[in-house]
């Protein structure tokens, strides 16, 4: 018979032969146990495939912890994990391991078997005392979880109220806008222009230069109305940007009740913005209608088309500048008042109502 193949000799770090070594019995979320002997001075544990002990546990960090042999001791160290490492029910950062210790990393438990090692000094407790300690640990753990959730809720509540306060401040600042007032001076100018221009009459139709004066006057009025619309549009663009910022801050709120109240306030702010948009639209309509009227004047009086006299007598087919201004002022004041009432409600919420009980 031929020679049997000689098994390959496993190389061991000589430092591991000096003093104690260890085996790690790892039980992951699946419930399957697997033993890992300590084959190096330092062993890394984590979710990453690059770790010496890799565990498919979503609650573990990529490089969660490392176990090292240092000066004859087996020690574990947290590598900055998100969920930490727990030794026999107590959270630790770096500590010596003893035979029989149990580590918990995420949902994974690791029992430590220290070869040639000793038990933890306080491990010699009676089963009854140990059971009492375990029960106490479970109670404290439950309280810790509840306490942690409570603290987390309070922290989120503080963030929500800070965001709410910022929303209220920004919304109240936007209340200072006065789009209707921006046109007051122009409306006064228009009234004087119309008074000086006069209204043409088909009963005594203007001719020549007088007819052209009417045409030029109404064309200039149309341009004035358009300039007012453009100016208010620029003003509205700033309001729209502010409204977008308000919406963005409101989306950061987690508390459903606060978020709902803020959404109601946001709707009212949007309605106020719609008043401004309607104001702009009215000026554009007035500009177009005035320009159309100037064209009718030109055709009726300059070109002598008497068929258009009826259209001329009907005048400009749009609300007057004064009517546009009055409508804006009335609707804007109403919308602004609704926003302010809602902000007062939010003031009460931001002032401390609805905070978690102590």
Image (cartoon, grey):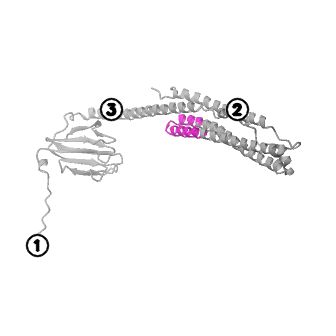
On the question of residue 238 being in view, the answer is yes
Would residue 139 appear left or right of 191 to someone viewing this image? left
Front residue (pair 284, 177): 284
Residue 210 point in image, percent of width and height: 81, 42
Residue drawn at 63 percent across, 36 percent down: 272
Residue occupying the far right of the picture: 203
Report the span colored magenta: 236-265
User: SS class of the residue under badge 2?
Assistant: helix
- Dot 2 or dot 1, earlier in sequence: 1
Front residue (pair 356, 118): 356
Give residue 79's mark.
Answer: none
Residue drawn at 24 percent across, 41 percent down: 77
Local crowd size for mark 3, using a 10 Å CA cut-off: few (<14), some (14–19), many (≥20)? few
* Residue position marked by numbered label 2 in the rendering: 330
Magenta region's main secondary structure?
helix
Residue drawn at 64 percent across, 42 percent down: 230
Residue 229 point in image, percent of width and height: 66, 41
Look at discs 3 and 1 and give the one toward the viewer.
Answer: 1
* Residue position marked by numbered label 3 in the rendering: 136
Residue at mark 2 to residue at mark 1: CA–CA distance? 108 Å
Residue at mark 3 to residue at mark 1: CA–CA distance? 65 Å
Would residue 187 appear left or right of 14 to someone viewing this image? right
Residue 251 is inside the magenta segment: yes
């Amino acid at each position: 018979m031929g020679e049997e193949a000689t098994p390959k000799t496993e190389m061991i770090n000589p430092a591991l032969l000096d003093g104690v070594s260890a085996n790690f019995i790892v039980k992951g979320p699946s419930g399957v146990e697997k033993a890992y002997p300590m084959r190096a001075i330092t062993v890394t544990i984590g979710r990453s495939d690059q770790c010496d002990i890799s565990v498919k546990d979503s609650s573990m960090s990529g490089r969660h912890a490392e176990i090292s042999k240092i000066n004859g001791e087996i020690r574990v160290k947290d590598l900055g994990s998100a969920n930490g490492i727990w030794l026999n029910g107590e959270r630790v950062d770096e500590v010596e391991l003893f035979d029989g210790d149990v580590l918990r990393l995420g949902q994974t438990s690791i029992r430590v078997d220290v070869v040639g090692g000793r038990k933890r000094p306080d491990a010699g407790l009676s089963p009854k005392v140990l059971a009492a300690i375990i029960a106490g640990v479970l109670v404290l753990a439950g309280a810790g979880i509840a306490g942690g959730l409570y603290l987390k809720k309070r922290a989120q509540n503080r963030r929500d109220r800070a965001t709410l306060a910022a929303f209220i401040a920004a919304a109240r600042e936007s209340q200072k806008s006065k789009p209707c007032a921006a046109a007051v001076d122009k409306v006064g100018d228009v009234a004087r222009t119309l008074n000086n221009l006069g209204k043409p009459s088909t009963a005594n139709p203007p001719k020549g230069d007088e007819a052209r004066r009417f045409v030029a006057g109404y064309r200039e009025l149309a341009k004035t109305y358009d300039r007012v619309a453009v100016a208010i549009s620029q003003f509205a663009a700033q309001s729209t940007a502010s409204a977008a910022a308000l919406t963005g801050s409101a989306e950061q709120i987690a508390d459903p009740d606060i978020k709902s109240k803020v959404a109601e306030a946001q709707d009212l702010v949007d309605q106020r913005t719609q008043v401004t948009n309607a104001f702009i639209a009215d000026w554009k309509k007035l500009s177009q209608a005035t320009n159309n009227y100037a064209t009718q004047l030109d055709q009726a009086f300059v070109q002598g088309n008497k068929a258009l006299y009826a259209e001329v007598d009907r005048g400009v087919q749009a609300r007057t500048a004064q009517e546009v201004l009055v409508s804006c002022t009335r609707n804007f004041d109403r919308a602004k008042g609704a926003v302010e009432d809602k902000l007062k409600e939010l003031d009460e919420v931001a002032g401390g109502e609805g905070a978690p009980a102590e």
